[in-house]
Image (cartoon, rainbow, N blue to C red):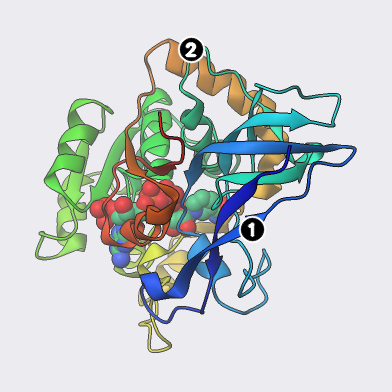
Amino acid sequence: MTVTAREIHLRSRPEGLPSRENFEMVERPLEAPKEGQILLRNLWMSVDPYMRGRMVDRKSYIPPFQLGEALEGGAIGRVLESRDTRFQAGDLVSHFAGWRDHAVIAGEGARKIEADTIPAQAYLGVLGMPGLTAYAGLTRIAAPKPGETIFVSAAAGAVGAVVCQMARISGCRVVGSAGSQDKIDWLLQEAGVDAVINYKTVPNLQTALAKACPDGIDIYFDNVGGYHLDAALALANEGARFVLCGMIAQYNAGPDLPGVRNLFQAVAKRIKLQGMIVRDHFDLLPDFTREMSQWIADGQITWRETVVNGLENAPEAFTGLFRGENTGKMLVRLDDS
Ligand code: NDP
């Protein structure tokens, strides 16, 4: 079978918040799959904040996207044709050739998923990379104990919402921050979070956080950086653990980014600040999948998703992450059903 793929390419490197002009749609005929390869029709693709870092031409923990090539990222596809004995036509797989409607990939890069009881796109969110990030950060770095207070920034996002609920299951008092009343209502009423601060409307985040955390902060799960990190440092208890997962507040910032002012608190309070990259924790995948599936089945973990339709709208879905347009996982639906 030969097909023509529609792919989103990076046309130019963005400065500040990316815009439509930084992306272009390209049609490309695909060669038929060779031995060990599979041909896929993508049904869902993920847009994630870390992709902004890959649009910059610099050395980092993952190579930059190349101009004139298809972007990549998590996706769920259906196998149309297989020349890998592990897969057959009709299988649903999770893989990394997102930002396109069709792809030919090596079978090694695909993982079969079961979507009988859980929707397929959950493997891009609560049961996928963001869920694993939350799981690894909490279990390996934060190690929460009952009665401790955890503060989670971007609490209504894909990672943050899982962190909040796992911490609640661990018996923590959970305090989040989010940027809209709708997100706050969901976190309080459905996700079981104890208190949520609207960081966009409070006059002073640190003052609001002090009120929400009368016993101080034992764990800070940082998705935002900037003044969120400063406020958490100011209110941390001795021996607090900080999971440095992401710093979305600075991904589109220029070189005159303000520094962290309260870092000395890490010395005075013997705080452990540990950065993490999810791919260092892929060995946790079997434990994570088992435990998360059980929590979902027991109704202990719930989720929301924000869906944008159509590959052509993927750039807007991506930039929407920086405008807070998603509650839970931001997804792009690629099939027509
Ligand atoms: P989210 O689903 O949380 O989406 C991003 C959210 O961040 C937005 O909805 C918005 O919510 C909030 N936000 C955007 N800009 C700002 C800002 N300037 N200040 C404060 N909040 C902002 O994304 P993910 O859950 O996928 O990712 C969360 C973080 O985790 C990111 O920093 C990401 O880079 C990081 N990450 C790190 C990984 C790792 O391996 N280290 C793996 C996966 C994610 P609101 O309305 O609340 O402002």
Q: Which of pointers 2 and 1 indicates the residue nearer the eye?
A: 1
Which secondary structure, mark 2?
loop
Image label count: 2
**Residue at left 55%, top 45%?**
101
Three-letter residue code for mark 1: Arg
Q: Quadrant of residue 78?
A: top right
Q: Residues within 10 Å of mark 1 (few under 14, many from 20)?
A: few
Can residue 252 be seen in the rendering of this structure?
yes
Q: Position of residue 65 (x, y in %)?
A: 62, 68
Can you tell which mark lies on residue 230? none
Mark positioned earlier in the residue sequence (2 or 1)? 1
In the displayed structure image, the side of residue 83 where residue 138 appears, left or right: left
Can you tell which mark lies on residue 117? 2
Quadrant location, ligand no. 1: bottom left
Q: Position of residue 310 (x, y in %)?
A: 39, 46
Are circles 2 and 1 on residues that touch, CB within 8 Å? no
Three-letter residue code for mark 2: Thr
Can you tell which mark lies on residue 28? 1
